[in-house]
Image (cartoon, helix red, strand yellow):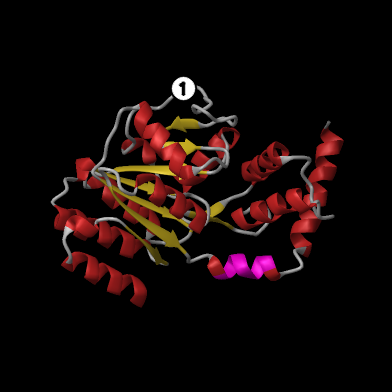
Amino acid sequence: MKKFTLLLIAQLLVSTAFASWKSETNSHREVYEFVLNQVSNEGISPKDALIVYDIDNTLLKMKQNFGSDQWFNWQSNCLKIKCPELIAKDFQDLIDLQYEIFTMAKMDPTEDYAPQAVRSLQEKGFSVIALTSRGPESRNATERELRRNNYDFSKSLFGESIAASFTPTGQKRIASYQNGVFMTSGMHKGQMLKYLLGRFQKHYKFIVFIDDHKKHTDRVFNMFLNTESSIYTFRYGLEDNKVQNFNLSDKAQSIKLGRALLSLREQLQ
């Protein structure tokens, strides 16, 4: 992308006094190349660098809209305005419904190169984890699809896996951190990353965060801005057209599948 390339060139020419900024990209290769160039530019060792990936619409995408990130956001908004297409009783029920869909659905990488980008960073010694808004109840299905698509964060996590789910300090929802996948139940990703680093008393000089939602990249950026860490965030937009098309559609297929799921639930109870 022209915008990204210009930012990258500019960044490589300036001093580390400007070592925090936000950008956008549609390419995992661009993020990978940025990381390698920038740690070299700043004189940072991979062991002092942390790379954090979102999952939905960043590393993986649903084969259909039903149960996808855009579907979840639509239903979440329906909770607020009580639209007739709402199928969840409350936010936790919406998380539970998405979990039920995840157990049945398969996913694909957003890009063929994405799993290779993650593996290459891991092989070079970077700490690499996934930070998702999914809840702990979706862990088995999430890790199944990550493995099936050749992602494995267990080899590059910081700290250690925490056996049981937990409630982060000052929060009401539960989270879990196992095998390098941090599941946060829709909580503030900036706060969650800061919490996890503090829990393990870890500090990184260099942090990169990639997510398809601007609110999440902004929150992480603001949480680490003016700290002792260089923070770089990338708003990943390759799935934007698909998301926009869903948002503008009549959502007939998703409505039909949602009603079928509720009917199946009732029959099994």
Could you tell me what secondary structure mostly forms the magenta stretch?
Answer: helix
Q: Amino acid at mark 1?
A: Ala
Asked whether, in this view, residue 39 is left or right of residue 245, the answer is left
Residue name at image x 61 percent, y 68 percent: 244
- Where 11 sits versus 265, above or below? below
Q: Is residue 269 magenta?
A: no
Q: Residue furthest left?
A: 43
Q: Which element carries disc 1, helix, strand or loop?
A: loop
What segment carries the magenta color?
241-247
Residue name at image x 85 percent, y 37 percent: 266
Residue 118 in view (yes/no): yes
Residue where numbered disc 1 is placed: 163
Q: Residue furthest top?
A: 164
As rendered, which of 244 and 146 lies closer to the eye? 244
Residue name at image x 35 percent, y 33 percent: 197
Residue 67 lies, in percent from the top left, at 66, 51
Residue 179 in view (yes/no): no
Q: Which of the image's four quarters has the N terminus?
A: bottom left
- Using a 10 Å C-alpha cutoff, classify the residue at mark 1 as few (fewer than 14 neighbours), some (14 to 19) or many (20 or more): few
Residue 215 lies, in percent from the top left, at 51, 54
Write down the quadrant of residue 161 in the picture.
top left
Asked whether, in this view, residue 105 is left or right of residue 202, the answer is right
Residue 255 lies, in percent from the top left, at 79, 57
- Where 240 sits versus 209, above or below? below
Q: Which of the image's four quarters has the C terminus?
A: top right
Q: Residue furthest front?
A: 226
As rendered, which of 87 and 108 lies closer to the eye? 87
Asked whether, in this view, residue 169 is left or right of residue 30, the answer is right
Residue 156 lies, in percent from the top left, at 31, 39
Residue name at image x 21 percent, y 40 percent: 47
Write down the quadrant of residue 185 in the picture.
top right
